[in-house]
Amino acid sequence: MTATDLLVQQAINGLSLGAMYALLALGFTLVYGILELINFSHFNIFMVGSFVALMALEAMGVVGQQTVMSGFPLVGVLFVAFLATTMFTGTLGVLIYRFLLRPLRGVKGPAAMITTIGVSYILFNIVLLTIGADAKNFPNPLPPIQWAIGGAVLRLREVLIWVIALLLMGGLTYFVQYTRLGKAMRATAQDPEAARMMGVEVDRVIMTAFFLGSALAGAGGMIFGLYYNFTSFIVGFNAGLRAFTAAVLGGIGNVPGAMLGGVIIGLIEAVSGQMIATGWTDVIIFSILVLVLVFRPSGLLGRVAPNKS
Amino acid sequence: MQPDTLLSFRDVNTHYGDLHVLKGVNYTIGRGEIVSLLGGNASGKSTTMKTIMGIVRPTTGSVAFDGQEIQRLSTSERVRRGIAPVLEARRLFPRMTIYENLEMGAYTQKRDAQFADDLDRVYGLFPRVKERRSQLAGTLSGGEQQMVAIGRALMARPRLICMDEPSMGLSPLYVEQVFDIIVEINRQGTTIFMVEQNAAMALSIAHRAYVLQTGHVVLSGTAAELRENPAIKEAYLGEMQVAPA
């Protein structure tokens, strides 16, 4: 492989990681945009999502690396697993809000944020105690199709990940920009009390944000499994922290910012792992975060001015 | 209660924690009226508006709209029944377009032919709003924002518009325009309940007014009566406070 091929290869890898981080970052941003709450339970909703996807695939007879499918059965199986995962994690997010965070609305200070950390640990430990500490093999039903780009290799799984991520991000953007509930969501993020006085049921908007964000985290978890071919109770922390970084880098509360931040973090991770050393990836990612925050505290696409007018 | 009462407060008390804000307040707003609420800072004017919209719930007493008690209803149900706010300091959604702000005003309404009619009506009243409909609301001047805020309230197809300080922060030229529009909207059949610091302006267009002081209604009457009241002249056309009645 030449240096160019390596760079192309890492760009392919980075875009795949970036797609996953972007989906996860969107959940942080949607909830933060409305509640100004950093939802740390998001880390492990992602992890739970990867297990739900694993179980859904296994329930359909897709186990380990032996089952290889193609055509409609493949699409069908992936679609069903995707629906099961996103519905499960979306509902989980709504339940967390409804029963654990809503009672804290109006409580000032870090109570709600601490609660999300607690919920995150509860999910983490439930999975550890019921499923176990060892990494689980994640099914890979994709046929081994790949294309050569110079010396670099583009596999079907990467294309699939990009397509899923683009469809989800496009869908979310459409939802937020053009639907009635999406507009209510933006209005609530900009001025909750004014939105309420327009007749918006703010609680419903918040639940929608939790549902969508958590469903996207579940989708990210499934992508994680498809990409790395394993999952474990521990995967939420690294991915979650990077996705959170991506959200802050893009400008937390900003939907396109989360997508951009995710892709940037994914590319940095892949390229720095290649060019420098994998061990230094975290140092590089978080140094960039610190630098961006020093020079542009509101993030790349964030607003510098306070968001209330 | 007279048969043509649209909104009434009966012995309404409100509290923020230990702070007693409205203290046994009574208002009666008749259908088709412009009623102004005057008072100094911290007199309970904004709390009155929030109590009508359901942002603040009365601890005791009742609020009735169109013959039915509404004090336990959600804000969205009140909007659906025909109460729309023009909020203090406009409170437009700054990063939404003017058109989207108007859409938010119509949030509780179905997207039918009436929506287009309402939009035409707002554009008719405010040609500038139409010109700038794809612009972000945050980029408008205060006066233009006030027009959008009034337009946004009209999009809810309200029977009662509650205005909180419609003239605040506007240049005299815009104040004049805003008050002309309020009169025009009222002539078209919408009842107006208006909190206003600019007592002279408010009394020039209102039919009746209440004067609120530290949570009590200390005076009420027709606008003509209040304009001639020496205490009002001193307090609102001058600087001093009205003595409690």
Image (spheres, rainbow, N blue to C red):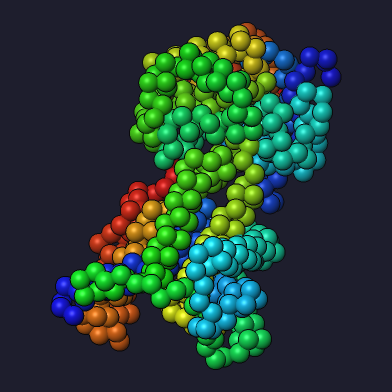
Task: Give the position of the N terminus of chain A as an image quadrant.
Answer: bottom left
Q: Position of residue B102 (x, y in %)?
A: 51, 29
Q: Is residue B60 above or below residue A146?
A: above
Q: Nearer the viewer, residue B211 or A216?
A: A216
Q: Residue at x 83, y 15 (%)?
A: B3
Quarter holding residue B24? top right
Q: Can see residue A268? A: no
Q: Nearer the viewer, residue B136 or A130?
A: A130
Q: Position of residue A91 (x, y in %)?
A: 65, 62
Q: Position of residue B230 (x, y in %)?
A: 60, 14
Q: Residue at x 37, y 56 (%)?
A: A257
Q: Nearer the viewer, residue B102 or A69?
A: A69
Quarter holding residue B227? top right
Q: Is residue B16 above or below residue B2?
A: below
Q: Position of residue A31 (x, y in %)?
A: 52, 58
Picture mark count? 0
Q: Residue at x 46, y 61 (%)?
A: A164
Task: Give the position of the C terminus of chain A as an image quadrant.
Answer: top left
Q: Residue at x 65, y 23 (%)?
A: B158
Quarter holding residue A248? bottom left
Q: Is residue B230 above or below residue B22?
A: above
Seen from this angle, which residue lies furthest front?
A71
Q: Can see residue A92? A: yes
Q: Is residue B107 above or below residue A52?
A: above
Q: Nearer the viewer, residue A131 or B74?
A: A131
